[in-house]
Amino acid sequence: MKYLRYQVQVGLVAVAMLAGMTLFEAAKQAANPDISVWESHAITILASTVFATVSAYFLLRRQFVLNQNLGLEVAERVKAQAQLEQSIRELQETLSTVKTLSGLLPICASCKKIRDDKGYWNHLESYLREHSDAVFSHGVCPSCAKKLYPDFLDGVE
């Protein structure tokens, strides 16, 4: 879109130069009808050179600004791409550290020990600590507390 706008600007400058040179030539002939062809062309060449130089300056300055903007846009996209790649790496690292338990776990119906892949029986807490990121803190549930400490909990509900 910016390039099309630039092309339109160049076209408008060319039309303005053509109109200006035509008016210049008409004014020159009206002001001095006895001017020789050589003098007429020398003046026209000089004037068109000045107009072209000024126009070229402004067009090149505009092109420079467009190139600068394009460079900034490319730099922003490169930065965004680098950030995206960094986020992807971080997510992949995080995903690789996630531990999950799945499948059937053979567990003793009495003591609740779990049999590992090597056939050894491990305490539930030890097995889960090794195969997950779980951390345990021990407590006593109310029904076990009544069973284990009946004297201590008399009258407490």
Image: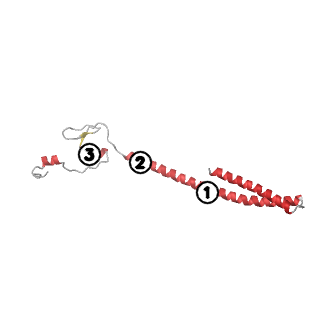
| Number of residues whose C-alpha sits closer than 10 Å to that of mark 2, classed few (under 14), some (14–19) or many (20 or more) | few
| Number of residues whose C-alpha sits closer than 10 Å to that of mark 3, classed few (under 14), some (14–19) or many (20 or more) | few
Q: Amino acid at mark 1?
A: Gln
Along the viewing direction, whichever of 115 and 152 lies nearer the viewer: 152
Residue holding disc 1 = 68
In the rendered image, is residue 44 in sight? no
Residue furthest out toward the front: 30
Q: Position of residue 52 (x, y in %)?
A: 75, 58
Q: Position of residue 127 (x, y in %)?
A: 27, 43
Q: Which residue is depicted at the point 68% across and 57% down?
A: 60
Horizontal side of residue 84 vs 146, given as left or right: right
Horizontal side of residue 19 vs 76, given as left or right: right
Secondary element under disc 2, as helix, strand or loop, is helix
Secondary element under disc 3, as helix, strand or loop, is helix
| Vertical comparison of 109 with 17: above or below | above
Secondary element under disc 1, as helix, strand or loop, is helix
Q: Which residue is depicted at the point 39% across and 45% down?
A: 96
Residue holding disc 2 = 93
Per the rendering, the mark at residue 33 is none
Q: Position of residue 139 (x, y in %)?
A: 20, 50
Q: Amino acid at mark 3?
A: Ser
Labels 1, 3: front one: 1
Per the rendering, the mark at residue 126 is 3
